[in-house]
Amino acid sequence: MAEQARSAAPAARGRRLDSDREQAILRAAYELLGETGYQGLRVDAVAARAQASKATLYRHWPTKAELVTDAVRTCKAADAPLPDTGTLRGDLRAWFCDIATMISSEEGPLLAGLFMALHTDPDLAAQLREMRESKIPLAETICARAVARGELRPGYNAGLIDEIVPAMVFMRRFALGEPLDPPFLDHLVDDIVLPLLTR
């Protein structure tokens, strides 16, 4: 059944689901992703929860990776607006606080599970990386503001923020089980990120 649906996908995928139906399927996928993780997510369970047929799901999302990526894109809580506090330190501190709040919410373990699945599912990895690359480069935006205010000299490497901060936040929260509290966020900004940007 699955193979038949997959082979029919290119011809049939053009028929759009109505918005409510699509939302119900993506919401079901997102909820189950939180309950079972990516590896445990089964398309037939999504179909059952959304009261849709497996053939319908495979017509519109030929792979589990495509279904999950669309579910994350549609159902993940909206990112907080990029902070603009008037200072580089304030912007970084407010932004990292938003990240910490999201990671500490019910979405944190869901996203952590997806990151782990990137190692075993190349299709999922490609889909999620493409979604990430389409986002506004927040670190660069914050640093460019700081340059305009005279707080930061050209030549900084905004990419260091994306290299360091998510890894430290995930390590502290999920590996060490420590809180993402104000002292940790101050340490992250004052002892690590700011010195690297201004060296």
Image: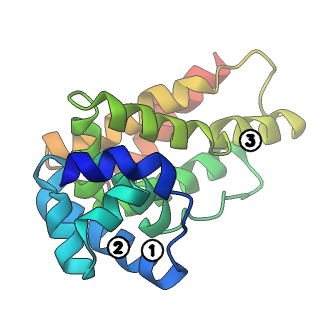
In x, y percent, where is residue 93?
55, 51
- Label 1 SS: helix
Q: Quadrant of residue 140?
A: top right
Label 3 is placed on what type of residue?
Thr
Asked whether the residues under the numbered discs 2 and 3 touch, taking CB atoms below 8 Å apart as contact, a structural biologist would say no
Foreground of the two, 102 or 18: 18
Q: At x 87% / y 40%, what residue is drawn?
A: 149
Residue 8 visible, this orientation: yes
How far apart marks 3 and 1 lie (CA) works out to 34 Å
Foreground of the two, 191 or 113: 113
The numbered dot on residue 141 is 3
Classify the position of the N terminus by image quarter: bottom left
Asked whether the residues under the numbered discs 1 and 2 touch, taking CB atoms below 8 Å apart as contact, a structural biologist would say yes
Q: At x 48% / y 66%, what residue is drawn?
A: 74
In x, y percent, where is residue 59?
39, 58
Location of mark 1 (residue):
22
Residue 106 visible, this orientation: no
In x, y percent, where is residue 167?
34, 33
Classify the position of the C terminus by image quarter: top right
Location of mark 2 (residue):
25
Tally of numbered discs: 3
* Lateral position of residue 27 relative to residue 154, left or right: left
Camera-near label (3 vs 1) is 1
Dot 2 or dot 3, earlier in sequence: 2
Q: Label 3: how many residues lie within 10 Å, few (<14), some (14-19) or many (20+)?
A: few
Dot 3 or dot 1, earlier in sequence: 1
